[in-house]
RNA sequence: GGUGAGGUAGCUCAGCUGGUUAGAGCGCAGGACUCAUAAUCCUGAGGUCGAGAGUUCAAGUCUCUCUCUCACUACCA
């Protein structure tokens, strides 16, 4: 049973990288679950701040900008807008969607580095890196290609051969060339970088991860422990790049020897969670209502009583459980560490990988043209890749929309509201006696609602969706038992009971649908004439289920909403498969 | 190669610290109902729980070996 008290919850989603609109796997693995969770917690009356941002630094951003013929900064402006729009189309309820290129993040990143250095957690070291003379830039390992020394495959990348799967070092490649320009004029040069001494933090990190063994998913702790067990290595947190956050000294001047170098994108990206929160708080409308970023991030200023929940794909776990915590702990300052970390596996495309180049998979901007956001939100959450990778197929998508949304929920709303309009003048009727049917649905809800709340609180999305569906199905079963259309012939009052309870179930389903399918939820609640201020469910109070079944004022005028979910037809599947590749 | 996560009904997945006839949804078959988007409700058929060995009074659940899939492997993010 949930405690009836408001909590302050900070939610962050892994930052979507700037170089393109994200595919459905990215959406399903971080932004969407973070949104559903945020909405659910708000619904239950908690104070939620959901922060996200575009991750804008790094080599791929520079290269993508060059390919688009734009300056990096213009390119990032453009793509940030595109991603913000895509998010809005999917009804992602960010309290703030910021940018890692913001002034606040720049300042924080530089401050963190100075604090880490002062505490002995940074060290300047020399390493060898591939330099492309023709491109005039250093190349990350995977941007160097050549012939694989193991299998003689000619398009092997510097980090791994895609043909034989062997892990490589760029110096192993035979006949290496730049993947950017194709130039063979590449050489190995010495370059200086700052290293984050993660190794010195190992014991502290291990102890901290241990404290979360019980409350973090296996996926999360096992990845963190794996890295710790293998021996945490120090990590370079600067790169030879122009685009990014400059490395400065205590006076704010470029650090000696660090011209042409910037912080590694993975050093500043998580710091952008804080930066974006500061940017959120700096907005006039937030300041006007007394919003402050400190209570979310500074443990000396209230963040001790904030619950911080992160959402991410499994590739991000090491950075969030080890690198960023090293930054936080190593700063010696009272920053908030993550409390709960939910990691997801991948959504795969017919069992294979999503691929932009091969046009495999669906991207957010395309998806929204195909089907309303509610459809995607429901399907992706009901099939969230929680315990292992989850394959997306059009057939499964069709099945969950048609069966769950259209038949079970949509049809339920439609059947009882239109019957009320037809037989009871569109008004919530009074009258009738409690029968076994009403007792049955009351018991059913008394059992299922607390379970649903608990699944949301523990972020078990598949289970939360399954429970939600079961509640909808119980509504249909209730109508079968109560059969108002049968009673109507002999006892209109008794029919009224069935209709009234049915309508109250519609209202309840509308409220419960808000975190998952917000558009349909709004249509339902509008049709039930429920005022905006009355659409929350404080702390998931289930102490009086009977009251929930008679909450609508008798005589309240309601209407039958338009069809909530149109079904997906076989022709749609064919057309989409044609367009997006589909089964191969 | 190393490490991790998975392999449970045709499909997608639940099964916590081992304990009566292994569960749900979809799909399929039969029935009921007619308020509804041919929707809904009920009933039923379907599994030697990847393979093999072991521990135990008892194993899907613990141990070992093998096998398949996926991911990560630190300069992509």
Image (cartoon, coloured by chain):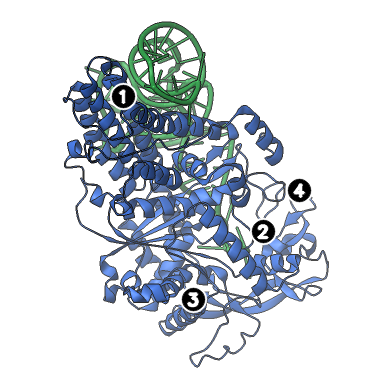
Quarter of the rendering containing residue A507: top left
How dense is the environment of label 4, judged by Cα within 10 Å: few (below 14), some, or many (20 and up)?
Answer: few
Q: Earlier in the sequence, mark 2 or mark 3?
A: 3
Furthest residue toward front: A425
In space, the residues marked 4 and 2 are separated at their CA atoms by 15 Å
Residue underneath mark 2: A159
**Mark in the foreground, 1 or 4:** 1
Q: Earlier in the sequence, mark 1 or mark 3?
A: 3
A537 vs A546, left or right, is right
Residue A496: give x, y in percent of width and height. 24, 27
Q: Are marks 1 and 4 in contact (CB under 8 Å)?
A: no
Residue A410: give x, y in percent of width and height. 43, 33
Residue A324: give x, y in percent of width and height. 44, 68
Q: Kindly tell me whether residue A384 is visible in this rendering.
A: no
**Same subunit under labels 1 and 4?**
yes
Q: Are marks 1 and 2 in contact (CB under 8 Å)?
A: no
Q: Earlier in the sequence, mark 4 or mark 2?
A: 4
In space, the residues marked 1 and 3 are separated at their CA atoms by 55 Å
Q: Earlier in the sequence, mark 1 or mark 2?
A: 2
Residue underneath mark 4: A151
| SS state under label 1 | helix
**Mark in the foreground, 4 or 3:** 3
Which quadrant of the rendered structure holds the N terminus of chain A? top left
**Same subunit under labels 2 and 3?**
yes
Residue underneath mark 1: A479
């Amino acid at each position: 049973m949930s405690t009836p008290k408001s909590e302050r919850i900070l939610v962050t989603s892994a930052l979507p990288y700037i170089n393109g609109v994200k595919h459905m796997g990215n959406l399903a693995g971080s932004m969407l679950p973070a949104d559903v969770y945020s909405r659910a917690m708000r619904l239950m009356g908690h104070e939620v701040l959901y922060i996200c941002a575009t991750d804008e630094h790094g080599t791929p951003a520079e290269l993508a900008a060059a390919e688009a013929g734009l300056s990096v900064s213009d390119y990032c402006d453009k793509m940030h807008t595109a991603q913000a729009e895509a998010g809005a189309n999917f009804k992602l309820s960010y309290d703030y969607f910021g940018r890692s290129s913001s002034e606040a993040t720049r300042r924080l990143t530089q401050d963190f580095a100075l604090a880490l250095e002062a505490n002995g957690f940074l060290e300047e070291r020399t390493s060898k890196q591939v330099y492309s003379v023709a491109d005039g830039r250093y190349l990350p390992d995977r941007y160097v290609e050549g012939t694989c020394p193991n299998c003689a495959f000619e398009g092997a990348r510097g980090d791994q051969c895609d043909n034989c799967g062997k892990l490589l070092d760029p110096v192993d490649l035979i006949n290496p060339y730049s993947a950017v320009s194709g130039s063979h004029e590449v050489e190995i040069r010495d370059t200086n970088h700052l290293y984050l001494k993660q190794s010195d933090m190992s014991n502290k990190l291990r102890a901290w991860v241990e404290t979360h063994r019980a409350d973090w998913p296996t996926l999360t702790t096992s990845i963190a422990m794996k890295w710790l067990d293998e021996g945490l290595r120090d990590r370079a947190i600067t790169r030879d790049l122009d685009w990014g956050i400059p490395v400065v000294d205590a006076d704010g001047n470029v650090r000696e020897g660090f011209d042409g170098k910037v912080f590694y994108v993975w050093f500043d990206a998580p710091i952008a969670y804080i930066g974006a929160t500061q940017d959120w708080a700096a907005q006039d409308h937030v300041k006007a209502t007394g919003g402050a970023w400190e209570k979310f991030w500074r443990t000396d200023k209230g963040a001790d009583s904030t619950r911080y929940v992160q959402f991410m794909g499994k590739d991000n776990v090491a950075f969030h459980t080890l690198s960023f915590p090293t930054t936080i702990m190593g700063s010696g300052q009272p920053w908030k560490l993550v409390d709960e970390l939910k990691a997801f596996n991948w959504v795969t495309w017919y069992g294979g990988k999503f691929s932009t180049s091969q046009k495999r998979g669906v991207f957010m901007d395309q998806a929204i043209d195909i089907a309303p956001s509610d459809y995607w939100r429901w399907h992706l959450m009901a099939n969230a890749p929680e315990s292992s990778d989850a394959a997306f197929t059009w057939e499964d998508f069709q099945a969950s929309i048609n069966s769950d949304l259209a038949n079970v929920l949509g049809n339920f709303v439609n059947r009882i509201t239109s019957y009320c309009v037809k037989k009871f003048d569109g008004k919530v009727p009074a009258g009738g006696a409690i029968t076994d049917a009403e007792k049955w649905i009351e018991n059913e809800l008394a059992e299922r609602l607390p379970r649903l709340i608990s699944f949301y609180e523990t972020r078990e999305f598949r289970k939360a969706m399954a429970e939600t569906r079961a509640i909808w199905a119980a509504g249909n079963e209730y109508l079968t038992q109560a059969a108002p259309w049968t009673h109507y012939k002999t006892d209109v009052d008794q029919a009224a009971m069935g209709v009234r309870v049915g309508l109250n179930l519609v209202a309840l389903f509308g409220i419960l649908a808000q975190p998952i399918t917000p558009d349909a939820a709004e249509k339902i609640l509008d049709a039930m004439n429920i005022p905006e201020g009355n659409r929350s469910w404080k702390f998931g109070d289930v102490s009086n289920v009977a009251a929930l079944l008679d909450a609508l004022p008798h005589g309240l005028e309601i209407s039958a909403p338009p069809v909530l979910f149109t079904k997906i037809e076989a022709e749609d599947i064919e057309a989409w498969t044609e367009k997006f590749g589909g089964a191969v």
